Amino acid sequence: MSEPIVLVKNLLKSYRRGSEIIPVLEDISFAIDRGDFLALMGPSGSGKSTLLNLLAGIDYPDSGEIIVGGIDISALSETQLSMWRALNVGFIFQFYNLIPVLTAFENVELPLLLSPLSRKQRRSHVEAALEIVNLMDRLNHYPSELSGGQQQRVAIARAIVSDPSIIVADEPTGDLDRASAVDILELMSNLNREFSKTIIMVTHDPRAAKRARSIMYLDKGTLKDAPAESAF
């Protein structure tokens, strides 16, 4: 049996507010299998987004280990962590985070600009990513010329263009209408099934979570058993 792609050991994280220390995550340990599609659920303030940021190398824990692909990212310097993140993590956000003055093609190309790839190689990667999300006919359109669902597809193409080890998604359907949300969830499921992408998705929506292979619940900074569906 292969080792998990993510291994978290005794993770603690808190924030300081004035002289007060606010605990966010308390002694969390878990593993995520390679090729899993994990839905991370919990009420507001439970620590979901904080945990996602730690797994993606955006923030450091107070203590504990976060091992991704055999590398303890909690022990990396800021420069090393930035380089690791660029090579290994694809990000999907609720509000797309596209650059409005760049075309769909240019937005997707952004993660590749600091890579050693030639212009021709970058174009090949970008076109492959846009083909996967079925947006080749919109590659020269600006975000303002795209629907919300299409903008999220561009964001997904940007997330996968560098072939990352993991994809992290923070409420990826939270700003979409129902039909667009279903399309995006189906696309993410396809990335997991057909391309074996490991996906970690924060969501409040039980219907979105049902697309995942596994579900993890956080409440007040600790892992919990599955609650009643109405709790979310």
Image (spheres, rainbow, N blue to C red):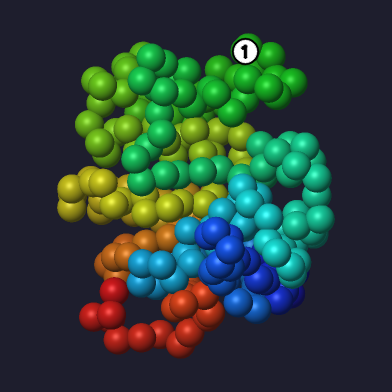
Q: Residue furthest left?
A: 178
Relative image position of residue 6 (x, y in whole percent): 67, 64
Relative image position of residue 198 (x, y in whole percent): 57, 57
Q: Residue furthest front?
A: 19
Residue type (three-letter) at the residue carrying disc 1: Lys
123 is higher (above) or lower (below) than 70: above
Left or right of residue 60: residue 176: left
Relative image position of residue 130 (x, y in whole percent): 43, 29
138 is higher (above) or lower (below) than 218: above
Quadrant placement of the N terminus: bottom right
Quadrant placement of the C terminus: bottom left
97 is higher (above) or lower (below) than 173: above
Label 1 Cα neighbours within 10 Å, binned few <14 / some 14-19 / many ≥20: few
Left or right of residue 92: residue 10: right
Front in this rendered view, residue 49 or 157: 49
Q: Image point 37% across, 37% down: which residue?
A: 96
Disc 1 is placed on an element classified as: helix
Task: Mark yes or no: residue 124 visible.
Answer: no
107 is higher (above) or lower (below) than 169: above
Relative image position of residue 195 (x, y in whole percent): 54, 49
The residue at which mark 1 appears reads as: 120
Q: Image point 62% across, 57% down: which residue?
A: 54
